[in-house]
Image (cartoon, grey):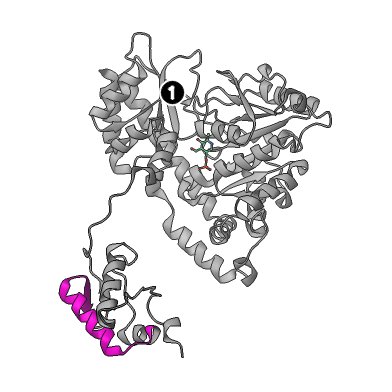
């Protein structure tokens, strides 16, 4: 039997020539550890297996291991074999360019990358993240176990680019029940986060898919998409990289000014809860934008990023319900569960299905299957609804605490956008320090804050802070609120 196939790690070693086999093996192992190819804790093959692999005597390997143990490169313990020693080599410095998570955090939270790298604050009230400490670990684990037990073998192979049918069916049922989406599983595409979803759509639209028969856009030399003047910055960048020209719709107390939609092929909106101002698109404007789409053949993209969380009245139903042939619905698990899942979904008009699926296939064939099956199980078992209800209560209490603390300690500031979502807008009265000054003041108290201007052109409501009350873990929330009030009180 080939032991290598069954025991320990595969090990690629280049034995140096000359100086004898044992010295050559020692040199090769030292080099592998030094260069980081063998990391601390890695279990090496038994001397018998490695000897067989290399075609040398077992004693030669045992002697080489013994020498490297004596030198501190390896450790050998009865029962746990020979391993690379914990601190056998100094950690190479990590180049700043590989700190990808930090730069994503920066983009989301309104700070320059360098600023964020320097800013790991103890308290964080920037928007964009749910309370990660509330992830339903046991429910997820139970759903994952169930999903794995039930999954047919074919689920582990290349599968439909739209995603697993189990999840598309579960989502279609959930979205129509909870969000008023008119979704058919066949017209749904599971994506790796909304960021991917918007990229796929952007490329499909830039290529002319979903465009009216007149071929609008081509005469102008490029297809255009209107975006809200305040919004999630990455989205605009992704759309431009996809080849679309973006232009901005002003935002006011009724949401995006869809009356300003000019000659455009598409529009991207956050109708349930404008990001970041927090206002819903007014009923009149909802009707207006759907009428525009019907009249012109244009496409409306609805980013329903936190539609599950509305506190004081019934959730605002999805715009897509008004006309599924004109509106693309996009949802995500990033707020209802956690962003780390990277799970989002599109409910598409039939004319956009094929081009979007083609883009998805080219992007990554399909999203990872096991988490899709787990989410499907979570939804069909009712655990997803229970989690969302629990979190709605949790965030509502936090919002109430935020509003109460501000009313008590800094009654001169106005809070808006509080009816839904995981963030609120604290409007700065005339004469207040600038957004940047308040962000800097907060940093001195170890609190991270984001100013509204990061999200785009500041509207008539003027400067403000966008306060994400969802993200702090419970133990840090009181401290974060105290610091926020201290910053605003000056
Ligand atoms: C407006 C908006 N849309 C969508 C998303 C979600 O993106 P993703 O699903 O890629 O995490 C976010 C994330 O913060 C957001 O702020």
Using the rendered view, name the quadrant where residue 165 is placed.
Answer: bottom right
The answer as to whether callout 1 falls within 8 Å of ligand 1 is no
Q: Residue furthest top?
A: 431
Residue at 75% across / 24% down in the picture?
A: 292
Residue at 60% across / 26% down in the picture?
A: 227
Magenta segment: 54-77
Query: For this rendering, which residue is in front, 127 or 321?
Result: 127
| Residue 66 versus residue 470 in the image, above or below | below
Using the rendered view, name the quadrant where residue 290 is placed.
Answer: top right
Rendered location of residue 287, percent (x, y): 71, 24
| Residue 156 versus residue 23 in the image, above or below | above
Q: Residue furthest front?
A: 18
Is residue 65 in the magenta section? yes
Residue at 41% across / 20% down in the picture?
A: 464
Q: Principal SS element in the magenta part?
A: helix
Q: How crowded is the residue under tag 1: few (<14 C-alpha within 10 Å), some, or many (20+)?
A: many
């Amino acid at each position: 039997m080939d032991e290598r196939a069954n025991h320990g790690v595969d090990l690629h070693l280049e034995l140096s020539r000359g100086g004898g086999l044992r010295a050559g093996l020692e040199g090769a192992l030292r080099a592998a550890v030094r260069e980081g190819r063998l990391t601390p804790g890695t279990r090496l093959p038994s001397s018998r297996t490695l000897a067989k692999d290399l075609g040398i005597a077992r004693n030669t390997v045992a002697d080489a291991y013994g020498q490297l143990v004596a030198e501190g490169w390896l450790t050998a313990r009865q029962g746990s074999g020979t391993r690379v020693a914990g601190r056998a080599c100094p950690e190479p410095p990590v180049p700043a360019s590989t700190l990808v998570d930090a730069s994503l955090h920066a983009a989301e939270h309104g700070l320059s990358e360098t600023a964020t790298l320097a800013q790991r604050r103890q308290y964080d009230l920037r928007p964009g993240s749910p309370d990660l400490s509330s992830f339903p670990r046991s429910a997820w684990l139970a759903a994952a176990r169930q999903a794995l037990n039930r999954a047919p073998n074919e689920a582990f192979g290349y599968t439909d680019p739209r995603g697993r049918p189990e999840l598309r069916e579960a989502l279609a049922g959930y979205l129509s029940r909870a969000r008023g989406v008119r979704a058919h599983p066949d017209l749904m595409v599971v994506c790796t986060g909304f960021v991917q979803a918007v990229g796929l759509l952007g490329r499909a639209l830039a290529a002319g898919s979903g465009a009216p028969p007149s071929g609008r856009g081509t005469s102008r030399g490029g297809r255009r998409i209107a975006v809200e003047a305040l919004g999630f910055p990455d989205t605009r960048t992704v759309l431009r990289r996809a080849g679309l020209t973006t232009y901005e719709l002003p935002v006011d107390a009724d949401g995006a000014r869809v009356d300003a939609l000019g000659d455009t092929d598409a529009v991207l909106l956050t109708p349930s809860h404008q990001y970041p101002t927090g206002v819903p698109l007014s009923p009149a404007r909802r009707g207006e934008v759907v009428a525009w789409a019907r009249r012109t053949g244009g496409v409306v993209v609805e980013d329903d990023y936190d539609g599950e969380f509305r506190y004081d009245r019934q959730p605002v139903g999805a715009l897509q319900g008004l006309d599924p042939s004109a509106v693309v619905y996009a949802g995500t698990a990033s707020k209802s569960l956690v962003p780390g899942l990277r799970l989002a979904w599109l409910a598409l008009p039939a004319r956009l299905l094929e081009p979007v699926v083609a883009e998805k296939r080219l992007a990554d064939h399909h999203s990872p299957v096991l988490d899709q099956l787990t989410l499907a199980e979570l939804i069909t078992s009712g655990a997803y609804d229970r989690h969302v209800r629990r979190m709605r209560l949790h965030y509502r209490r936090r919002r109430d605490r935020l509003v109460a603390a501000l009313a008590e300690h800094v009654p001169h500031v106005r809070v808006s956008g509080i009816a839904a979502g995981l963030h609120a807008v604290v409007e700065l009265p005339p004469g207040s320090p600038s957004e940047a000054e308040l962000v800097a003041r907060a940093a001195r108290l170890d609190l991270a804050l984001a100013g509204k201007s990061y999200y785009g052109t500041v509207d008539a409501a003027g400067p403000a802070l966008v306060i994400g009350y969802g993200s702090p873990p419970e133990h840090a929330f009181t401290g974060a609120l105290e610091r926020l009030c201290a910053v605003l009180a000056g």
